[in-house]
Amino acid sequence: MAERISAQGLTKVYPGGNQALSDVSLEVEPGTFLVLLGPSGSGKTTLLRSLAGIERITSGRITIGTVTVADGRSHLPPERRDLSMVFQDYALWPHLVVRDNVAFALRRRKLSKGESRARANAMLDRVGLGKLAERYPNELSGGEQQRVALARALVAETGLILCDEPLSNLDADLRERMRVEISSLVREAAATTIYITHDQAEAFALADRVGVLQQGRLVQTGTPEEIYTQPATPFVARFTGLSGELPVHVRQAAGGGLIEVEPAGAARVRPFHARMPREPLGAGLALLMIRPTGVRLCASHTGEHHLAGTVADVAFRGRGYEHAIDIPGTGRLTGVFSDARAHRGEAVGLRLDPAGCHLFAATADPGQAPALADTGAPALGAAGTS
């Protein structure tokens, strides 16, 4: 039966004062596939290991189902939390054949040896490895070893599966095939799943819900669509895929959840619209963050464009071409898609779609955003959040 997971105010401080988690709270409904997304050092591995019981939290509370497994004073070890893990390095026993590696997960179920072997064989058939049951791990490819690790996690039929970047050691094509297998098999098992990765595309492809971590804090949770279309901070926007960012002047509210802006110092034709920000924004300078889906090439002589620039680079991507465009006085936009190739050095226009243009206060991300002044002007409004 899928478990509900609750974490309240989790803090983890290592000896020496390194704080890996800071007041992290999350609720995971039964059967949900949650992906924790963040760069190296963001705290996602520490959070997963804390849920597993491998790490002992400094303060806070973790509840799995109806059982409090950690509260800063008491701590249930991993073997008493009735969960399964899929590790980045597979963690297979080298001296056991594939069948026995899978059956090892059933040792706490008090099954007969014959029943354990039968269940292991059935699970290996489900992951397409039935014919390799008598091989040792060193006789398997990386993808086959990962499927053994997945079979071992599934065969125990626990209500919670934790996945520690299980695809990071595989090549690109195998990663995609294994992603589909993990998604299908875990959802078929109907277990609650928490999966960590630093890969935004992998997170969005797998998740029912995504949690984004930054420097030990959970800065946003939501569906993949909510994270992409309503990033809570410039960090979230950057980490989930940008074409680029521009300093802009905020002009006026335009209705329909939009604000009229114009680039600060860039070659331009006319003002354009961006999405209303989540927080109230003063008139004056602000930071515009542009998704690849929010910009497209157009002819510079038609008057349809909002920005003008020069093609710095072009790459064929099968379905079309991605361009890097230098905008005088502003910077560079990358991943600008077009069905047709524009040539390096060619002058082009760029048309912006408000749906892919996200606006933040100039001071929302100190140390990373361009140095823009705070005008202290009256707020123009804010969009509702989900």
Image: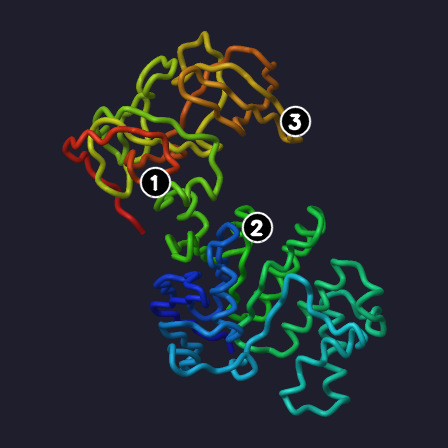
Residue 157 lies in quadrant: bottom right
Read off the residue under disc 2. Answer: 202
Q: Are marks 3 and 1 in contact (CB under 8 Å)?
A: no
Can you identify the residue that label 1 sits on? 365
Q: Secondary structure at mark 2?
A: helix
**Residue 183 x/y as whole percent:** 60, 60
Q: Earlier in the sequence, mark 3 or mark 1?
A: 3
Q: Give the residue displayed 43% in from the left and 56% down from the top.
A: 211
- Label 2 or label 1, whichever lies nearer to me, is 1
| Residue displayed at 49% across by 68% down | 31
Q: Are marks 2 and 3 in contact (CB under 8 Å)?
A: no
Residue at mark 2 to residue at mark 3: CA–CA distance: 22 Å
- Mark identifier at residue 77: none
Residue 57 in the image: state x and y as whole percent.
43, 72
Residue at 74 percent across and 58 percent down: it is 143
Hey, what amino acid is under mark 1? Asp
Q: Quadrant of residue 94?
A: bottom right
Which label was assigned to residue 316?
Answer: 3
Element class at badge 3 = strand
Q: Is residue 376 left or right of residue 143?
A: left
What's the amino acid at mark 2? Glu
In the rendered image of this protein, does residue 101 appear above or below residue 348?
below
Lateral position of residue 251 relative to residue 157, left or right: left
Sequence-earlier tag: 2 or 3: 2
